[in-house]
Amino acid sequence: MAFEVRLPELFTVTSAEYEAMHSAWCKAIKVLPHFSVVHKQDIFISENYRPELQKEGLSFLDRSFERHFNERPYLAHKCYLFLTKTTKERMRQHSNFSTLCRGRITPKELNHEMVVKFMESVEQFERIINDTGCISLRRLSDDEILGTETSSGIIEKYMSLSMSDVTCLEDIDLSAREMRVGDKMLCLHTLSDTDDLPAKVSTDNRYERLSTDRSDCRLSFASPVGLLLPCNHIYNQYVLHRLPRRESCPLREDGPQHEQSFQVQPQQRDQQGMDRPLPERGPFLRTDKRPGAL
């Protein structure tokens, strides 16, 4: 499921409102079924401001405001949210896994009952976020996702690194030497290990440049990679909703014992299932070792 997210204006959110929004996100994620993926995507692209002088009822101050910012560059922001239901086996896949190598895109384990339950939880997720009053979700239609003959969908815009309608897709180069989409060069950074994060993270920080002794200007913790990053960029956040550790890994402590028993009894390798290699650990498996990780 895909949603367009509308966030509050920058520099207008208090510390209490940041805490309330963070609590709403945590509460909404918990209502999703296990093995769900929450993907929040923030797109920041530099554009020139276009005044809306044709509006009716503009006062003298409104027209002066529009003329003052005419053609000034700024970072335009679009935010999307994608909710995906997967299975336990799919959650273990590596980043080099491609659905193009399989006969079907959806996992075989998904049935009608699981899909209905997931859709009900998505509706509950949407209500929890919209009830905050600060964030609103709008479900995207198929045409907005895939595009039509006259307009581009978000897939085409993302593949061309643009927020405006595109007439055709550009060449994509993902070689070892460079990553390029058309004439746009890419630089990718990934943070997937919780050990690289600070020991304590707050929901918001004080922005000293606009704060005074009497007024306190607050920004979110991730603002340095958001609007405060002065370049075109896309910020992707992924939350993998797994089973709790006590349920997902009940035999992890007995792993060395089982491995030793397999080596002592080589004649059992001919039995069904014993000759298959154990799956490798996924890149996000370490997050399960820390309490409270989703």
Image: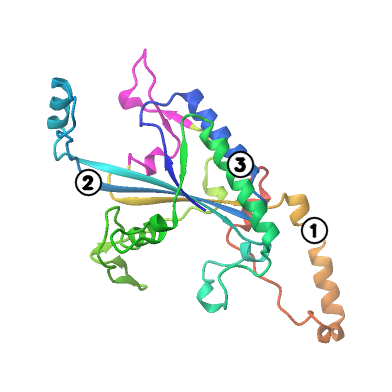
Q: Which residues are magenta?
A: 204-228
Describe the element under mark 3 as helix, strand or loop: helix
C-alpha separation, residue under disc 2 versus residue under disc 1: 54 Å
Q: Position of residue 116 (x, y in %)?
A: 65, 54
Q: Nearer the viewer, mark 3 or mark 2?
A: 3
Judging by the rendered image, the residue that carries numbered circle 3 is 124
Judging by the rendered image, the residue that carries numbered circle 2 is 47
**Residue 213 in the image: above or below residue 41:** above
Q: Is 125 included in the stretch rendered in magenta?
A: no
Q: Position of residue 42 (x, y in %)?
A: 40, 47
C-alpha separation, residue under disc 1 versus residue under disc 3: 37 Å
C-alpha separation, residue under disc 3 versus residue under disc 2: 36 Å
> Quarter-wise, where is residue 277 in the image?
bottom right
Which label's residue is closer to the chain start, 1 or 3?
3
Callout 2: 10 Å neighbours few (<14), some, many (20+)? some
Describe the element under mark 1 as helix, strand or loop: loop
Residue 253, which numbered label? 1
Q: Is residue 148 left or right of residue 102?
A: left
**Residue 86 in the image: above or below residue 237:** below
In the rendered structure, which amino acid carries the disc numbered 3? Gln
Q: Is residue 93 left or right of residue 181?
A: right
**Residue 97 in the image: above or below residue 123:** below
Residue located 82% across and 78% down the image: 263
Q: Is residue 293 left or right of residue 159?
A: right
Q: How is the image coloured?
A: rainbow
Residue located 62% across and 68% down the image: 107
Q: Position of residue 27 (x, y in %)?
A: 62, 37
In the rendered structure, which amino acid carries the disc numbered 2? Glu
> Quarter-wise, where is residue 209 in the image?
top left
Residue located 36% across and 58% down the image: 153
Residue 28 or residue 16, whichever sits in front:
28
Which label's residue is closer to the chain start, 2 or 1?
2
